Amino acid sequence: HGIRATELVEASRGNLLECLNIVLDHFDQHHLDRSLRITGQSIVCLTAGNGLIHAASRTLFELTHSRITSSGPSSAKAFHMVCVREPPLHQVPWVQWEG
C-alpha cells in the first residue's frame, strides 16, 4: 500500500510537460477570459529537479512550446520554473528528448 522504490523516477523524467499542458488547457478557455495574455496571470512550476527535463518526444515539447509562445508577447513572463536542487552549470530549463 504505497510506492515502491522501483516506481520512483527522477524529477527530470517526470511529467512536467504534460502537467504544463493541463494548466494551459485551463487558460485556453478564451470564452471565460482566462487567456494569459488578457489576464496577466502567470504559471509557476515548482520542481524537485534542477531544470533538466527529459521529454517523452520532441512532438510533445514542440506542442508545449508553441502553446506557451502563442500566449502573447509577454509569454516569457507567463511561465516561471522554480528548481529546488542545486543550480546546474547550464541555462535552464534544458529539454532533452530521444534521438
Image (spheres, rainbow, N blue to C red):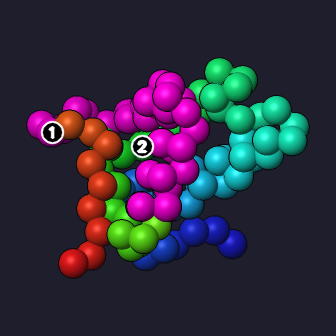
Residue 23 lies, in percent from the top left, at 66, 47
Residue 25 lies, in percent from the top left, at 71, 52
Nearer to the camera, 38 or 83:
38
Residue farthest to the top, as pictured: 40
Residue 97 appears in the picture as rendered: yes
Q: Residue at x 12, y 37 (%)?
A: 89
Badge 2 or badge 1: first in the primary sequence: 2
**Tag 1's secondary structure?**
loop
* Magenta stretch in the rendered image: 62-90
Nearer to the camera, 21 or 48:
21
Residue that numbered label 1 is attached to = 90
Up/down of 49 relative to 22, above or below: above
Q: Residue at x 38, y 33 (%)?
A: 84
Q: Residue at x 70, y 26 (%)?
A: 38
The quadrant in which residue 22 appears is bottom right
Residue 94 located left or right of residue 3: left
Q: Which image quarter holds the N terminus?
A: bottom right
Residue 99 located left or right of residue 1: left
